[in-house]
Amino acid sequence: MKNSFLPAFTRIVAFLIVSQALPVPAEEALMELVKKVQPSVVLIQTYDSSGESLGQGSGFFVNKQGDIITNRHVLEKASRAEIKTAAGKVYPIKGVIAEDLESDLIRVTLEIPQKEVFPIAVSETVPEVGEKVVVIGNPLGLDNTVSDGIVSAV
């Protein structure tokens, strides 16, 4: 089933959303940008029906109710999934709100105290080729890694 949960999401490149690719401000502001965004990024751990680890991915909060956006393939074949916040607290994913197969995006919800949620504003603007970006995520289990680069294609 294909649901469009926010019109902007179908126009934004998946890595831009899930990896937290952001325009790079002046060098002196880069550290401030990272400090501001890191609390919004979560690690997602998935498990099969016997409780064995399947894999992991990155996601981010989009509202104070605890909804998270991630790539759909992160949760594929999972019987259970949980998130780990930047503060190290773990919460189970309660359910899927919407998914977009074509864009490989999924919106999930969890029960989490609002004081633990730091939503990020999602831009409706698609980055341009050559634009500098910063990527914050959790690749291969490394929490809150930061790298920078340029957009090579959209």
Image (spheres, rainbow, N blue to C red):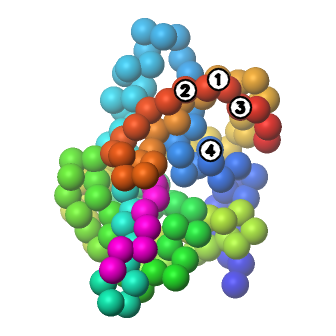
| Residue plotted at (75% across, 52% down) | 11
Q: Is residue 81 visible?
A: no
Q: Residue at x 53, y 46 (%)?
A: 19
- Per the model, the C-alpha gap separating discs 2 and 4 is 13 Å
**Residue 130 visible at all:** yes
State how far apart marks 2 and 1 are (Cα): 7 Å
Task: Give the quarter of the image for residue 54.
Answer: bottom left
Instruction: Tell me the element at label 1.
Output: strand
Q: Distance between the residues labelled 1 and 4?
A: 12 Å
Q: In this view, does 73 lie to the left or right of 29?
A: right
Residue type at mark 1 is Lys
How far apart in space, not on screen, are marks 2 and 3 (Cα)?
10 Å
Q: Do the residues labelled 2 and 1 touch (CB within 8 Å)?
A: yes
Residue 72 at what x, y percent from top left?
Answer: 58, 69
Callout in the foreground (3, 4): 3
Residue 53 shown in magenta: yes
* Along the viewing direction, whichever of 76 and 120 lies nearer the viewer: 76
How would you classify the magenta stretch by its main secondary structure?
A: strand
Secondary-structure class at tag 2: strand
Q: Residue 16 carries which label?
A: 4
Q: Name the residue under label 3.
A: 151
- Which of label 2 and label 1 is nearer to you? 2
Q: Is residue 43 left or right of residue 153?
A: left
Q: How far apart are marks 1 and 3 (CA)?
A: 6 Å
